[in-house]
Amino acid sequence: MAFNFFTKDMGIDLGTANTLIYIKDQGIVLNEPTVIAVDNRNGNVVATGAPAKEMIGKAPAVLSVVRPLKDGVISDFDMTAEMLKQFITRAVNEKKLSLRVVVGVPSGVTEVEKRAVEEVVRQMGAKEVYILDEPMAAAIGAGLDVDSSSASMVADIGGGTSDIAIVALGGIVTSTSLRYAGDRFNDAVLQYMRKKYGLLIGEKTAENLKIEIGCAIVDKDEKGKPILETAHASGRDAVSGLPKTIEVTNQDMEEALRESMDMVVDAIKGTIEKAPPEVAADIAEHGMVLSGGGGLIKNLDKLIEQKTGMEVSVAENAFEAVALGTGKSLEDVEKLKLYAKAKYR
Ligand code: ADP
Ligand code: MG
């Protein structure tokens, strides 16, 4: 049909930390922090995405820098809508467009919020909108055969939530959505620095330390000696209040992140325990896949292997798995309709 020429298939990963937009035949066209900055005096949007994230912790009082999704739920709907509008406009230049959109939303999002997200996307010109649970999208994007009768398992560790799911026959068999992920890992680093070194650091510094030298297990050399890595942490001395920079190691990070890593491991164990025995047997055979930015914590895969005996791999495109999954799901709309309906048990 002629008008189909202007139809665009779009997948959106509305993540707590990052929003990605995928367009069929183009791939991922946008990857921005889920952040928006507004001027309180007139309500104007000052920035969205990366430039808005830069303002966190530094913005003058007249500006509100908002992360509109928190702990996997939409905490500020109007801001989410405003931000999404800007992102979609940036991703597609054409004015008159018929969009078919799949949105991957955190699994903690309520039915009401799902409808609200759908409404925003419709206002942007979408004719068809499907809301897909993130773990399903992550599993598809990570290349798992979600339609197989043999179950597979995915843990998508993002900023706000760790979504763990076992999928089979096009649906989610068992899942756990833990409101504990990358943001909390940052917080753990921040608290550790204060307690151990009397150093007050900001959220961004904590995140940088985590990304740079964070690990679930410190690597060892052939003789079993820990391979040390270091980084500088700058902040304020808790006592003097003056600026201070210290050197921290990956051993510090392992200690700082221990409880957080245990939380994730326990949630994974718990999810397997909830699954029927046959499903557990499939998982033992296939192992599990990690996705999301939090899945990139060094040696988290190894830690999960040690604690569960399962084989664990990190998705090749861990950051993009959900976005790619939403995009891939558009290739077969009839199937997508089933996926989008499949509810958590
Ligand atoms: P969401 O789906 O919630 O938007 P993402 O999958 O984009 O989240 O992951 C964001 C989280 O991943 C953040 O907490 C960020 O600090 C963390 N992260 C990014 N890169 C790394 C890395 N190399 N190691 C550990 N954590 C990382
Ligand atoms: Mg995500």
Image (cartoon, helix red, strand yellow):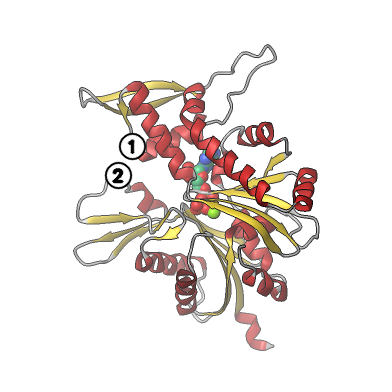
Mark on residue 115? Answer: none
| Residue 343 spot, x, y in % from top left | 61, 67
Is 82 drawn above or below residue 50 in the view shown? Answer: below
Query: How many numbered marks appear?
Result: 2
Which residue is depicted at the point 38% across and 33% down?
190
Q: Quarter holding the C terminus?
A: bottom right
**Left or right of 326 in this view: 42:** left
Is 334 drawn above or below residue 252 in the view shown? Answer: below
Q: Earlier along the polypeptide chain: callout 1 or callout 2? A: 2
Front in this rendered view, residue 166 or 33: 166
Q: Badge 1, how many Cα within 10 Å: few under 14, some, many 20+?
A: some
Q: Residue 194 falls in which quadrant of the image? A: top left
**Left or right of 68 in this view: 282:** right
Q: Quarter holding the N terminus?
A: bottom right
**Left or right of 155 in this view: 179:** left
Q: Would you say the residues marked 1 and 2 are in contact, meaning their CB atoms lie under 8 Å apart? A: yes
Please say whether residue 261 is visible from this viewpoint: yes
Mark on residue 57? Answer: 2
Residue with the mark numbered 1: 202
Q: Badge 2, how many Cα within 10 Å: few under 14, some, many 20+?
A: few
Which residue is depicted at the point 51% across and 66% down?
91
Is 244 drawn above or below residue 37 in the view shown? Answer: above
Secondary structure of the residue carrying numbered label 2: loop
**Left or right of 212 in this view: 286:** right
Which residue is depicted at the point 63% across and 32% down?
303
| Residue 268 spot, x, y in % from top left | 62, 44
Q: CA distance from mark 1 to mark 2?
A: 8 Å
| Residue 258 spot, x, y in % from top left | 51, 30
Q: Which amino acid is tagged 1?
A: Gly
